[in-house]
Amino acid sequence: MSEWPFLDIVVFLPLAGTLLIGLIPRARVGALRIGALAVTVVTFLLSLGILMNFDTGTADFQLGTSVEWIPEWGISYITGVDGVSLWMVMLTTFLMPLSVLASWSVERRAKPYFIFLLTLETGLLGVFVSLDLFLFYVFWEASLVPMYLLIGIWGYRNRVYAAMKFFLFTLVGSLLMLVAILFLYFSFPGSPTFNYQELLGTPLSLGTQRLLFLGFFASFAVKVPLVPLHTWLPDAHTEAPTAGSVMLAAVLLKLGAYGLIRFAIPLFPDAARELVPLVMTLAIIGIVYGAAVAIVQRDMKRLIAYSSIAHLGFIVLGVFVGSIQGMSGGILQMLNHGLSTGALFMLFGALYERRHTRRIADYGGVARSAPVLAGVFLFVALSSLGLPGLNGFVGEFLVLLGTFFRYRWWVVPAAFGIILAAIYLLWAYKRVFHGPITNDANLRIPDLRPREMVMLAPILVLIAFIGVYPKPFLDRIEPSAQKVVDQLRDSSALPEAAVGDADAP
Amino acid sequence: MPLDIPAVRLTGIAPEIALCATALLLLVIDAVLGERRNRWYLPALASIGLGLSIYFATEAWGTTRLELSGMVAVDGFASFVKITLAVFGLLTVWLGRDFLVRERAEEGEFYGLVLFAVAGMMLMAGAADLIVVFLALETFSLALYVLVGFRRRSLLSQESSMKYFLLGSFSTAFFLLGIAFVYGAVGSTNLYGGEDGPGIVSSFMATGASDVGLLILAMGLLIVGLGFKVAAVPFHMWTPDAYQGAPSPVTGFMAAGSKIAGFAALLRLLDVTLYPLREDWRPLVIGVAVLTMVVGSVLAVVQEDVKRLLAYSSIAHAGFVFTGLIAANDRGVSGSLFYLATYGITVLGAFAVVAVLSGRDDEKVTLRDYRGLFYDRPLLAGALTLFLLSLAGVPVTSGFVAKLVVFGAAIQEGYWWLAVVGMVTSAIAAFFYLKVLVVMYMQEKETEDAERVRSGPLSTGVIGLAALATIVLGLYWGPLIDVAERATLFFAGG
C-alpha cells in the first residue's frame, strides 16, 4: 500500500475540478477549455501513480481504501484495483484529456458541458474501483445522468430521442440489478453487508443464483450491449457529440463487460457456468450481426457504432469461454477497443467539423486534400480490424485461441466476423477517402491541425506499442483473469485458493 | 358519592394543542392589528407555534403509553410523524409567505388553516382509536378543502376545491361506514385496547373467528377512506385536479402532509393492530399497491402540466410506500417513515420551485414554460433537477435511499416480485421526470419574459434547505434511519 491514496484522489479529482470550472465565468470559453484540460491532465498524471504502485504478480485488490460509510446497513466505502480494473481506470484517465481536446469546438454552453464531462469521469472511475455493491451501484447510476445530458444537450438532430432511449434502457437494466443486489444482501448469512469480497462466499441455491445472475446480466447486457438489447447504442453513438461518442464507446460500453467479469461471474459462478452457452450464442450473434449491419450503414457514426457491437461480442466471448487466453484477450480487447474506436470517433468528429455531414456518400476523395487525416484513419481502422502488429490483433487472436481450446467450432463464426470487419472498415475508408471527388466541398478540407495531432498521437503510439509488445499489459491482467476463469470453471475453487493452483496458459 | 375524575395527561396531544392555540391567536392578532403593508409577524408567530409543537413532540419521544382513556397513543412513531409534519408546516408557511405577498392574498387565514391542518394530521399519527382517526381526518381535510380553493379569483382553484371536497366527503363516509362495521363485527373501535376496554383484535379473538368476513369488509372500507387521502388507485381521481388547482405551496403541503398523515394511520391500523390478520389484508393491499404504482407511473407520462405531472408522481410514490407497509416488518415500517419524510421534503422543494416559477396568478405551470430554464435560471433549474432525480430514485439523493429501504423490506419478507414491479414502474416514472429535464436543458426558450420571476428570500431558503436535505440524506442517511427505526418501537398496548 502506498502512502498516497492515489486511487481515491484520481476518482474524485475530476468532481473537485467541476468546482474550479464553476468559478470561471461562462463567457470565458477559452479559460473553461484550459481549465477542463488541466483537471483531466492532472488526473491522468496522478493515475500514473496507480500504475507505478501496482503490484504485478497478484490477483488481489490493491491501492484501495476502506472506510465505513453507513455501518447500520453494512455499507462501506471500499475501493481497490486489480488487473481487470487497472487498465479500465487508466483508459478512462488517458482518454479524458483527449476528449476535452476533441471538444475544442464546443462553443455553445461550454461551461455546463465541461462540468458534465468531468462529473462523468468521476462516475466512470468510481464504477471501476468500487468494491462495495452499494457504492458500485451509486457510481453506476450516477454516471448515467451526465452522459444523458451530454447527449441530450450537445448532440445532433435526434439527440433527445437518443438520450432518452439511452437512459431508459440502462435504467431498466440497472433497477433489475438493484433488486438482485438487495436479494443477495438479505441472503448473506453473516451480519448484513454490501462488501463485495465478503458477499463472494454467499451460499445460494442454483435456482436463486440463476435468477440473481439474470438480474445482474440484464443490467450488464444492456450496457455491453448484447443483441437484442443493443438498439439504444446506434442512436446514442450517432447523436452524441464527439467527446460523448468517444466516452460512450471507449469507456461506457466497457462497464458492461467489466460488470460481467467483476460481479456476475464471481458472485454466481454456478449460474454463470450453466448459462455459458446462452451468453456465447448472444456474443457470436453480436459479432456477426453487428459486422453485417455495419457494412450496409450509410451514416459513418452508425457504422462505427455497429462495429462496436461486433467488437464487444468478441470481448464477451473471450470472457465466457473459460480459458485464460480468452479472458486475458477479452480484457486486453476492452482496452484496445477503447483506443481504436475512441480514435475512430475522434477522427470522424474532426472530419464532421469540417464538412458537417455524417453521410458516407457525401464524402469521397478526401485523402487528396487531407492526406494525414486519411493516413491516420487507415492506421486506426487497421488496428480495429485486427491487423497483425497492431493492438487489435493481439486481443482478438487471444480470444480466438482461447475459444479454440474450449469450443473448437465456435471459432468459425467468430473468425468470420473479423473478415466482415475488414470489409466494412476498408470499404468505408475507400468511399470516404478515395475515389472520385463528387462534391466540391471535399476539395478544400483542411488537414489535421496541431491540436488534433496532439490528441491522436498518444493513441497511435499505444496502438502500435500494444501490437508489438503486449507483455506489460498482459502481465498485469493475467493473475486477475486467472482468478475469474477458475471461478467460472469450478466454483469449488475459492477465490483465495484460485491464485495458487492456476494452470499455466 | 365523590366524583372520580380520572387524571388527564396531555403529553400526547400537546403539539396539537400548541398548534390550535397558535392558530386561534393568529386569527385574533390578524383581526386586531388589521390591514398593514407588511405583516411579517404572522408567519413569525406561525413558525413559533410550529416550533413549540416540535418541542412538545420531542418531549414525548421515548415514552410509550396510551392517554385520554386509550384514545391517543404517545410513542416514538407518533413523535416522528409529528416532528416531520411540523417541519413540512414550517416550509409551507415560509413558502406561503412569499406566495401570499406576491398574490396580495389574505395572510392570517392561510397560516391559521395550515396550522389547523398540521394539527389534524398530527392527531392522525397519534390516534389509537378509529373515532379519533376520523376526527383527525375531518380536521385536516376541512382545512385542506379551504386551502385548495385559496386562489379565490381563480376558477380552476374553486373547481378543484369543490371536487376535492365532494370526493373527500364521499370517502370519509366510507371510512365512517368502515368504523361502524368494525364495531358491528367486534364491538370495539380501539386499536390497542387496555384498561378502558378491549381493543379490536382482542375482542375479535374473544368472539371467535366467525366474523372474519365482516371484519375484512370493514377493513376494506377503512382502506378506501385512508387510501383516498394518500392518493392510492383507484381512489386517486381527485389528485390531479386538486393538485393543479391548488396554490403551489398548498399543493406541496398536500402532497407531503396528507400522505404521511394517511400512511401513519394506515401503518398503525394494518401493521400494528391488524398485524395478526396480515394474511387477510395483504392480498387487498397488494392489489392496491400494484395498481397505484402502475397507474400513477403510466398516466404521468402523458401530462403536460407540471403540477399534474407531480400529482401522478405522488400517486406512484404512494404505491412505493405501500410496499413497505405490505412487508409489515420493522424495516418496512421504519422504511415507510423514512420514505414519507424524505419524499415530503423533496416534493415540497419541487413545489417551491414551481411556485417561484409560476409567476403572478400562479399560472405558468406547463412544460412549455420550463423551456431552456437551465440557461435562464441555472440554480433554480439545478435544484429542480435534483428534486426530480430524487423522485426518480437516482443515487446520491434521498429518494434512492428511500426506495432502497422499502423495496428492501419487501424483498426481506419474500415479496421480491413486488420489488420488481416497483423497479419497473420506477423506470417508467423516470421517463416523465426526464421529460422535464429535456424541456429544461434541451429545448430553447420561445419568448423573453416581460418580467423576470424573482425568488423571494424565504422561497430561496426553502428550496436551499430542501435541496440540502435531499442530497445530505442521499449520502449520509444513517442517523435519520436510526431515528426512524427507534420510532417503530410501537406501544403494544395492554
Image (cartoon, helix red, strand yellow):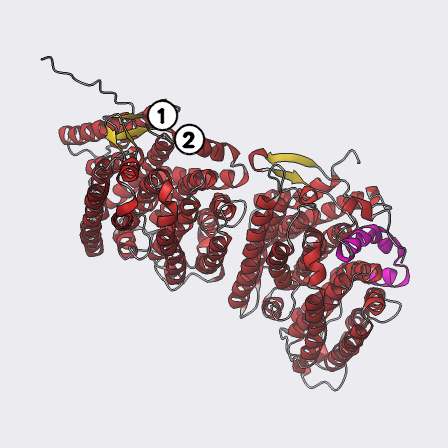
Q: Which mark is residue B369?
A: none
Taking B28 as reference, is A316 left or right?
right
Quarter of the C terminus of chain B within the rendering:
top left
In the image, residue A2 above or below residue B150: above
Instruction: Please tell me which residue lies in front, A345 or B272.
Output: B272
Residue B282 painted magenta: no
Is label 1 in a helix, a strand or a loop?
Answer: loop
Taking B65 as reference, is B472 left or right?
right
Instruction: Please tell me which residue lies in front, A39 or A23.
Output: A39
Image x and y of residue B20, in percent: 22, 30
In the image, residue A41 above or below residue A232: above
Amino acid type of the residue that numbered disc 1 sits on in the rendered structure: Thr
Image x and y of residue A489, in percent: 78, 57
Amino acid type of the residue that numbered disc 2 sits on in the rendered structure: Leu
Q: Magenta segment range?
A: A463-489
Q: Does residue B185 appear anywhere in the picture?
A: yes
Residue pictured at 26% horizontal, 32% vertical: B198
Mark with earlier residue (1, 2):
1
Is label 2 in a helix, a strand or a loop?
Answer: loop
Q: Chain of mark 2?
A: B
Q: Find residue B303 and report its image quarter.
A: bottom left
Which residue is tagged 1?
B64
Image x and y of residue A399, in percent: 81, 66
Q: Main secondary structure of the magenta part?
A: helix
Q: Which mark is residue B489?
A: 2
Q: Chain of mark 1?
A: B
Mark 1 and mark 2 in contact? Answer it, CB < 8 Å.
yes
Q: Does residue B150 appear anywhere in the picture?
A: no
- State the separation of the CA atoms marked 1 and 2: 9 Å
